[in-house]
Amino acid sequence: MKCKLCLKEKPLCKKSHIVPRFLYKGMFYKGDNTLIKLNPITLEKERGKIRTGIYDKDILCESCENHIGKFEDYISNELFEGTKNYSKKSSITPIVGNNNLHKNLIKGLDYNHIKLFCLSIIWKAHHSKHEFFQNVDLGKYESQIRDMILNIDPKEENIFPFAWFYYPEKKISTKALVPVRKFRLNNISISYNLHINHHSIVYKISKDNNSSLDEFSPKKDNTFPIYSLQGKTAKTHFEKLVGLKYF
Ligand SMILES: [Zn+2]
């Protein structure tokens, strides 16, 4: 079969995780190890059947799996616990906004890696047949994003920008996987919200003059702002993003 990334006829992996496994950490019910997922209508937590996270087959050949794996390893090491003995090159500077909204500026985070890491998740979601990702259809932009990932060419900051939000509190039901939602940002741009485990990544997958996500996206000077939201601000924002209140 043809690999979706390099387009070569090759044996394909039977298990490609759409969202890398480290993002699932702590997301399984203790005991039966089933996944905590969230019903986006009721915001009730449910048990997903998936025990190791969502994966799909026949998307990538082994060398392309490893190619994307390099972005994932880098982000796992720089922003999450990653591997032991890894010495992080990036640092976080908290920039206080108000009580409920904090900007955390990550410095020294490689632009290529963070951009292609996030784009590779939505690109894999496009190719997945799993119901969680059924709303993802990159349309004519699929091949452009494929080229960017394959050629390690993240392009300009305003090409397919995205924002990363973090909801650290346990009070609201953000520790869950929510089916990816497609919506029009500011009634203009085709956008997706991917939510997993206290984190939401909001992508703009269109080319238009709506620049509202640009300031949130990674910068070529290797900085990236991650916003953490708490309290009522977090609740309202999260409910909007998962589709309970529309933009
Ligand atoms: Zn390949």
Image (spheres, helix red, strand yellow):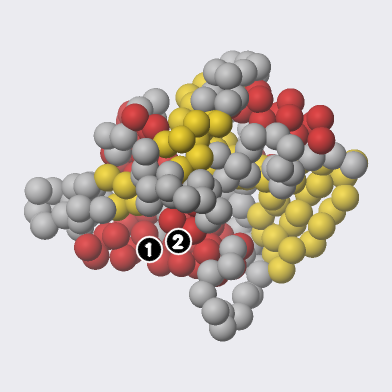
Q: Is residue 41 visible?
A: yes
Where does the image place residue 98, in percent across and percent down from the top left? 90, 41
Vertical placement of residue 112 versus 175, above or below: below
Disc 1 crowd, CA 10 A, few/some/many (<14, 14-19, 20+)? some
Kind of residue indicated by mark 2:
Glu
Q: Which residue is mark 1?
A: 69
Horizontal side, residue 21 vs residue 226: left or right: left
The 10 Å Cα crowd at callout 2, few under 14, some 14 to 19, many 20 or more, is many
Q: Position of residue 142 (x, y in %)?
A: 33, 38
Task: Give the farthest residue toward the front.
Answer: 31
Instruction: State the residue at coordinates (61%, 62%).
Output: 79
In this view, the residue in front, 217 or 132, is 132
Secondary element at image label 1: helix
Alpha carbon of mark 2 to alpha carbon of mark 1: how far? Answer: 5 Å
Seen in the picture, residue 180 relative to 98 is either above or below; the reply is above
* For residue 218, above or below residue 101: below
Locate residue 66, reporting x and y percent: 31, 65
Q: Amino acid at mark 1?
A: Gly
Which SS class for mark 2? Answer: helix
Depth check: give the residue in front, 246 or 15: 15
On the rendered structure, is 162 left or right of 32?
Answer: right
The residue depicted at 63 percent of the width and 38 percent of the height is 174
- Residue 72: give its label: 2
- Is the residue 33 above or below the residue 84 in the image? above
Q: Which mark is residue 14?
A: none
Identify which residue is drawn at 45% across, 61% down. 72
In the foreground, 228 or 15: 15
Circles 2 and 1: CB atoms closer than 8 Å: yes
